[in-house]
Image (tube, rainbow, N blue to C red):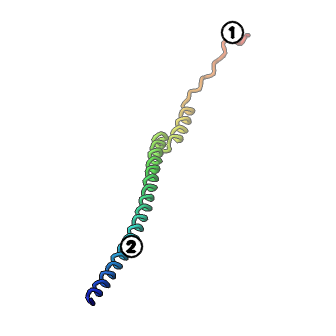
Amino acid sequence: MESLLKSDIFFFVTTLCVFSVTVLLLMILMHVLHIVKKVRKYFDCLSNEADGFLKDLSDLRVILRENQFGFKPVFEAIKTKAEAFTAKTKPKRKPKASEEKV
């Protein structure tokens, strides 16, 4: 009878330990899942920001190509000055004798 009582206590203690370990593992798993959910949210946000950064970078490349790396205004100013410098002025026309009499 004593051995039966000892075995019942052993099974009872074992059952409590298994139950407590199971609850502990479930709690750890819940925390791990919560952390994974947050990390996934951060990675999604990071991915969206990276896509936006790549779009901004491609827009910047287009702007730089259109403006010749920022030298377009300088080139246009030089071109305008060169055209003004090299523009031929029309020589003054001498009035004809018939126009002077009028």
Q: CA distance from mark 2 to mark 1?
A: 119 Å
Disc 2 residue type (three-letter): Val
The total number of labels drawn is 2
Coordinates of residue 61 in the picture (x, y in percent): 45, 45
Q: Quadrant of the C terminus?
A: top right
- Answer yes or no: do the residues labelled 2 and 1 have beta carbons within 8 Å? no
Mark 2: give few (<14), some (14-19) or many (20+) Cα within 10 Å: few
Q: Secondary structure at mark 2?
A: helix
Above or below 17: residue 36: above
Q: Is residue 8 left or right of residue 67?
A: left
Q: Which mark is residue 70?
A: none
The residue beneath circle 2 is 23
Residue farthest bottom in this picture: 2
Q: Position of residue 17 (x, y in %)?
A: 34, 79
- Looking at the rendered structure, the kind of residue marked 1 is Ser
Question: Viewer-proximal residue, 57 or 10?
Answer: 10
The residue at which mark 1 appears reads as: 98
Judging depth in this view, the residue of 72 and 18 nearest the camera is: 18
Residue at (45% x, 59% y) in the render? 42
Mark 1 is surrounded, within 10 Å at the Cα level, by few (under 14), some (14 to 19) or many (20 or more) other residues, namely few
Residue in the foreground of this view, choosing between 70 and 19? 19
Q: Residue at x 59, y 23 (%)?
A: 90
